Amino acid sequence: MTKAAPTFASTGDLGEKKITFAKLGDGAYAFTAEGDPNTGVIIGDDGVMVIDTQATPLMAQQVLTFIREITDKPVKYVLLSHYHAVRVLGAAAYQPEHIIASQLTYEMIVERGQQDWESEFGRFPRLFRGHESIPGLTWPTIVVDGKLTVDLGNRKVEIWSPGKGHTQGDTIAWLPDQKILYAGDLVEYHATPYTGDAHLRDWPATLQALRDLQPEKMVPGRGDALTSAAACEEALKMTQAFITDLYGAAREGVEKGLDLKAIFALCKERMDPKYGQWVIYEHCMPFDVARAVDEAKGLIRPQIWTAERDREMWGALNNG
């Protein structure tokens, strides 16, 4: 009997997730949903900062509902930890005074913002509920090239880019007084890193820069909010192990002269036992392997994913 090809990406993932709004410290919160993209919230005396917005204004209303149970202060800032549609296209719901992104994230929006939106919507439609409410691409009003400290009123937030990893422009928010880190998708917890736009060889050094902060609490890109230094270190180690194993297997396949499908099979054979139960593993692996192979072949800048490229690659690796 012929084995049926897997459903494309996460088009078959239709189940609702349990939402948690966790308090990590004074004015520091995490919106999580069982492995769906996380949103961070920081509240000061003068206003609110939201870190990553959800994919649509409709879905962002869920976050706003929790915020309004705590404070009626305005959302002064939205911070884009990086540029992926699922993270940023809900920004309009917050009516922020400013949207902050790194210079390298801004360059990604210019280069591939529309293609990324179309690609991600096709991959994971459940995360784009209310997509008709998206007014367009999310553009920053403050572009950071270096470090920026934002004072929300007796609550200072340090914003900086520790290095390339999940994308070229990853940006974190750090509450130094409480050692709380909002890491974006640089760090995942029991969730599969998506590496389709990654810089895999740079990523471990970037994780070390986060480790050097010695965070005691963390909001990863996906997975539960972490409330101890030991849990933060576990998440850093898990993420680093995945990307190291992925790149190592892909590089081995390239060195052996294998084609993409054979390298995909090699990576799956090596990685399924260790990571196969992580959230969105089957979704991510085709995109992850494709990027790892490109980087192993010397393609430093990730190719742009389009809806058409997504389907062609998926079909080539999954026999249909």
Image (tube, rainbow, N blue to C red):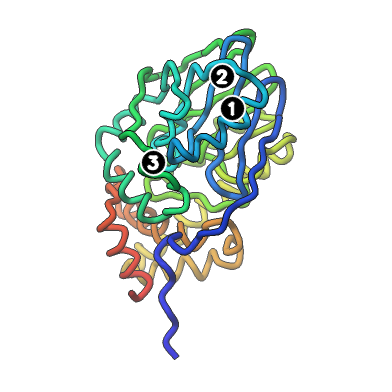
Task: For label 3, count other residues whose C-alpha is less than 10 Å away and answer few (under 14), some (14-19) or many (20+).
Answer: many
142 with respect to 306 (left or right)? right
- Amino acid type of the residue that numbered disc 1 sits on in the rendered structure: Val
- Identify the residue under disc 3: 85
Instruction: Give the CA distance from mark 2 to mark 1.
Output: 7 Å
The disc, 2 or 3, on the residue closer to the chain's N-terminal end is: 2
Q: Tags 3 and 1 in contact by the CB under 8 Å rule?
A: no
Q: Could you classify mark 1 by the number of other residues whose Cα lies within 10 Å: few (under 14), some (14-19), or many (20 or more)?
A: many
Q: Which of 159 and 116 is in front in this view?
A: 116
- What numbered label is drawn on residue 41? 1
Q: Is residue 20 above or below residue 148?
A: below
In the image, residue 73 lies at what x, y percent?
58, 15
What label sits on residue 75 in the rendered view? Answer: none
Q: What element carries label 1?
A: strand
Q: In which quarter of the image is residue 176?
A: top right
Q: Are marks 2 and 1 in contact (CB under 8 Å)?
A: yes
SS for callout 2: strand
Quadrant where the image shows the C terminus:
bottom left
The residue shown at (61%, 37%) is 31
**What's the residue at 45%, 69% (across, down)?**
266
Describe residue 142's horizontal placement relative to residue 188 as left or right.
Answer: left
**What kind of residue is marked 3?**
Ala
Residue nearest the observer in this picture, 164 or 307: 307
Q: Name the residue under label 2.
A: 48
Q: Can residue 215 be seen in this view?
A: yes
Q: Can residue 202 be seen in this view?
A: no
